[in-house]
Image (tube, rainbow, N blue to C red):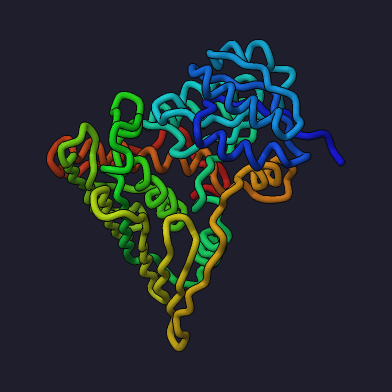
Amino acid sequence: MPNPLRLGVIGAGLKAADYARSWVKMPEVAFVASADVGVQSRRRLADICTAAGKPEPREFDDFRDMLAACRDEMDAVYVSTPHAFHAEQAIAVVEAGLDLLLEKPMVTTVPEAEQLVAAQRKSGATVVIAFQGGLSPLVLDTQRRARAGEFGALVNVGATIFEGWKESYNGHWKQQPEISGGGFMFDTGAHMMNTICLLADSDFERVSAYMNNRGKPVDITCAVSARLKSGALCTFTAAGEGPPGCASYMTLFFSEAIIRIDAWGGWREISMPGVSAIRETAETLDNPMKTFLAIRAGELENSSTVENGLRFAQLWDGIKASAAQDGDSILIEAARIEPQSGVR
């Protein structure tokens, strides 16, 4: 078999540890190094490796030191840190010529997204954003069929997501605005926004938004009305306070079909004239490394790209700007980087 992917990890927290327990069993992956400010997190990752009979990865408390010392020993890096750190770390990885599997959301602002897109295009590195919806077979099939014109023109989108996020993440870094980049809408709600960015297949033109922090330092609820450049209208509702549970319900109204799908691409219903809607289900992605490896090998098209991350960032910056002005309508400026083929 081919040589394993030599992997570095930036951010060895609980998410990385969860993935590492399965990745360490894959002969296609070899952990080389980890960087985390927490010794306990690095040690946990090392213990996962040794428990599987694999060598301990080298440990660093600064990702820059890891990239400098291990650049020639690695093929790719997985980044799983608080959202506000993604841009600097991702750009450094790509500028080092390494491929990148980056946790979602990609970055926190449009300028950061533009810098990462430019760095990726200059280096040619493979960059995959680990959104379940962005890599879901049901989402990708829906996008393909919509682009082929099977459903007609997109007319309207209604998207809702909810979770008992306010209490379940109480005291967590996700509720610290200086490192989270936002609250519920930017965390769990990112899945909703990202999947709609893919399926709507158009940049956003104008947005109006309201947020309520519900006593927290970050937004807990958010309501958004938007217009796409295609002319379709879109509404987002995000409720981060309520009973336990987490779910989304998104409806895309096309001129010839109505499609209901969830943000993670776990289920889909298609209603068309003369056809009864049947719920299709698919296992949501629990191991993005398999998809990342297939994309690197050229076996799959990369459907979770930095370009879609830029579209997402434009929407998010518009939402923040409008909410800060009590719902004033915000015109979303065009990206300063032209889209490449395959990104509309």
Observer-nearest residue: 258 or 291?
291
- Can you tell which quarter of the image residue 231 is in? bottom left
- Can you tell which quarter of the image residue 12 is in? top right
Q: Is residue 39 left or right of residue 317?
A: right
Q: Residue at x 30, y 45 (%)?
A: 165
Q: Residue at x 25, y 37 (%)?
A: 320
Image: 9 above or below 233: above
Expressed as whole percent of the image width and height from the top left, the position of residue 265 reads 49, 59
- Can you tell which quarter of the image residue 48 is in? top right
How many labels were placed on the picture? 0
Image: 138 above or below 317: below
Q: Residue at x 39, y 65 (%)?
A: 154
Image: 49 above or below 342: above
Q: Residue furthest bottom?
A: 274
Expressed as whole percent of the image width and height from the top left, the position of residue 247 reads 37, 58
Q: Is residue 311 left or right of residue 281?
A: left
Q: Residue furthest right?
A: 1
Expressed as whole percent of the image width and height from the top left, the position of residue 244 reads 31, 54
Observer-nearest residue: 291 or 154?
291
Expressed as whole percent of the image width and height from the top left, the position of residue 175 reads 29, 33
Q: Residue furthest front?
A: 51
Task: Note whether residue 137 is visible.
Answer: yes
Observer-nearest residue: 193 or 56?
56
Observer-nearest residue: 255 or 158?
158
Q: Residue at x 49, y 19 (%)?
A: 38
Task: Note whether residue 124 is visible.
Answer: no
Instruction: Specify the quadrant that holds the N terminus.
Output: top right
